[in-house]
Image (cartoon, coloured by chain):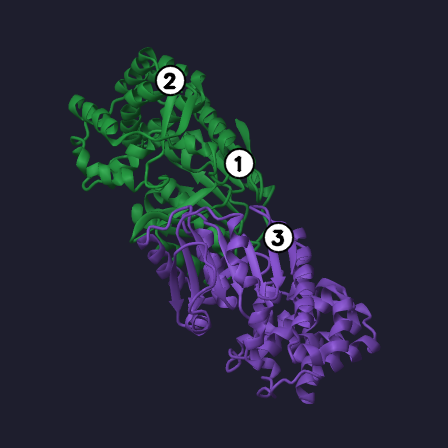
Chain colours: A green, B purple
Amino acid sequence: MEAIHVRAAISDYDVIVGHNVLTRFSDFVAAFDPGGELVVVTDDEVDRHFQEFPQLPRSAQRVVLRHGEHLKTFAEAESLISQLAEWNVGRDGMIVGLGGGGIGDLAGFVASIYLRGIPWAVVPTTLLSQVDSAVGGKVAVNLPVGKNLVGAFYPPRLVLCDIALLSELPDKEFISGLGEVIKTALIGDPQLFEMLEDQLDNVLSRDPKVLENMVTACAKVKADVVSRDERDRGIRAMLNFGHTIAHALEGAEGFEALPHGIAVLCGILVTLPLSKEFCGLSDAIINRIQQLIQRLPIDNPESLPPFEAVKTFIAHDKKTRKNEAQWVLLKDIGVPISNVTVPMELVQTAYSTLRGNQ
Amino acid sequence: MEAIHVRAAISDYDVIVGHNVLTRFSDFVAAFDPGGELVVVTDDEVDRHFQEFPQLPRSAQRVVLRHGEHLKTFAEAESLISQLAEWNVGRDGMIVGLGGGGIGDLAGFVASIYLRGIPWAVVPTTLLSQVDSAVGGKVAVNLPVGKNLVGAFYPPRLVLCDIALLSELPDKEFISGLGEVIKTALIGDPQLFEMLEDQLDNVLSRDPKVLENMVTACAKVKADVVSRDERDRGIRAMLNFGHTIAHALEGAEGFEALPHGIAVLCGILVTLPLSKEFCGLSDAIINRIQQLIQRLPIDNPESLPPFEAVKTFIAHDKKTRKNEAQWVLLKDIGVPISNVTVPMELVQTAYSTLRGNQ
């Protein structure tokens, strides 16, 4: 077990990574528990595995939402808040988000605005959320007019990553999580990248010890970045590596259901020739990255959409500055370069090459 | 003109108090203006006075809402956010709340969650908002199930209190604002209290110099309190002086329209005998406070509601702890005592005495 410290303006917190740490939930929560009503927010898929959320410090209310992207909406937030008010949850209350990234986003956003903010903890149940979304305090929900339009930087008081949960994850979700793991290694941890090269088979067979080391390494990279730039004003941009294309793919019609981590891997592959062109990334490194990604048992996705279909989404990326997408490229493993402007023709070439090789 | 500095976790800011400072709006905003779209949020009543918001740093969008309490709702926030998204307002955008407390609350809440927070400035146009709600970064909106249920601690980047605006304020609103001025003097500034005793006539005739000193003094008290306790974990509770009864009166059927500052004055009067009983407030001070309040030209309100009608609202006050209201009482002018538990019988006696004397 390891506790990774994260600094945040409102309140620092720990990311606990370990096997079966969930059984000690009440010990970890005791440190900041204000003693009022405790509300566990989860979805029906997760709920089937957690009929009895272990070791709650006291009786708790439970909100079980229908799983899916819709749960991460402003409307769902309003309905959850009305429920909290009905239960008379006060400032001494606490919310626990138990689930994947969507649940974490909804629970955290509601915690950030209910009574101007009450404490919350998050128990990410997917690899994707353990290695990425649960750490860093970024929460957001969707409006009909756009995704992640409203949200907050609102740190949880605890992130509890139980490695045991990963053993039950469907393959598709597990592999998707590896997309963010590879991204994390590339921007911040060359040793993790080597470990993935050496031990990918053990990762894929979900060796608990290997997974614990892997999730711990990812949490450390993310904790370091968000501690130095909680509100996304500078270096936090590097976490967006691979995401300019990923978000565009997820925006393109018919590709909403592309697993996020797989979209990120596509995004990374597109940035490799751009990284060579603009940052001098070596062919040797490019080969290593491509080879690692090719070793993943990814179901052949539908053919990628034509460039025209993703181009508009690149231009409308939230991270644009003066209407030009700000790319994160790679100079070397562990050396990301943020805020690079790339001519659209070169993006098109890189994208079309990837699409052709599919 | 005076600039009062406020410390806040995300970003410090200044409260500028002065005559005609609004004409220099663009100078003050330049210091933090990120250069993107500027959106002025106001209501139709304020808009009539500000057909041309002076000296905007550049072209701006304007949202004019129908005035009233309904504009401070979650639904209105959602609609405003959709509008911002439609205008493609980015992280380099800025919101300006131009109006009373409701506009400030809505503008600030939307600024706090849109794209996880964009900069905002507030130009309070009422005395109530200049001396109280605009300073301190507390923003909130109502849900159908309850008032101020959702919100944030989200500091503006600028508070611009133009004394010139106060000359046009309807008497009723001006007197209501004096309720919060008297509260502020009582919890934090004996000199301000003496000034009010000495110069109440000049205050009521709206002598600009006297008003400037008065608003400046209030802003200093509030700035000091919120700088030391931004997130309402300790001394900020003293700002609630007079508010336990005020919120209960505003909650009672038929009294929703009671001006906030008048409700606060009623609340202060009820706390005086309690302050004597629990904190040893002297009869001499009680007399001075009662006399000052009696000199205000307050329209005789409807008879206060019976105690039974306000009692339940006292028990459900947001500041309750273990279901007991936490009172702020007074030991002396400038010496508030927070978190006092008062037996309901004594509250009833004090309230009934005030009601009988009406």
Q: What residue type is labelled 3?
A: Glu
Task: Identify whether B122 is placed above or below A248.
Answer: below
Q: Where is residue B78 in the image (x, y as percent from the top left)?
A: 37, 59
Which residue position is annotated with label 2? A196
Which residue position is annotated with label 3? B230
In the displayed structure image, the side of residue B261 where residue A179 appears, left or right: left
- Please state which of residues B281 and B124 is positioned toward the viewer in this rendering: B124
Which label's residue is closer to the chain start, 2 or 1?
1
Disc number for residue A24: 1
Of labels 2 and 3, the one closer to you: 3
| Residue farthest toward the top in the current orientation of the protein | A284
Q: Where is residue A319 in the image (x, y as percent from the top left)?
A: 37, 39
| Label 2: few (<14), some (14–19) or many (≥20) C-alpha neighbours in 10 Å | many
Q: In which quarter of the image is residue A278?
A: top left
The kind of secondary structure element at disc 1 is helix
Q: Residue at x 30, y 23 (%)?
A: A274
Q: Which amino acid does label 2 sit on?
A: Leu
Q: Where is residue A172 in the image (x, y as percent from the top left)?
A: 27, 31
| Label 1: few (<14), some (14–19) or many (≥20) C-alpha neighbours in 10 Å | some
The kind of secondary structure element at disc 3 is loop
Q: Which amino acid does label 1 sit on?
A: Arg
Q: What subunit carries mark 3?
A: B
Q: Which residue is drawn at 33% across and 36% down?
A: A325
Task: Identify whether B134 is placed above or below A279.
Answer: below
Q: Distance between the residues labelled 2 and 1?
A: 29 Å
Q: What subunit carries mark 1?
A: A
Task: Identify whether B9 is placed above or below B86.
Answer: above
Q: Contact (CB < 8 A) between labels 2 and 3?
A: no
Of labels 1 and 3, the one closer to you: 3
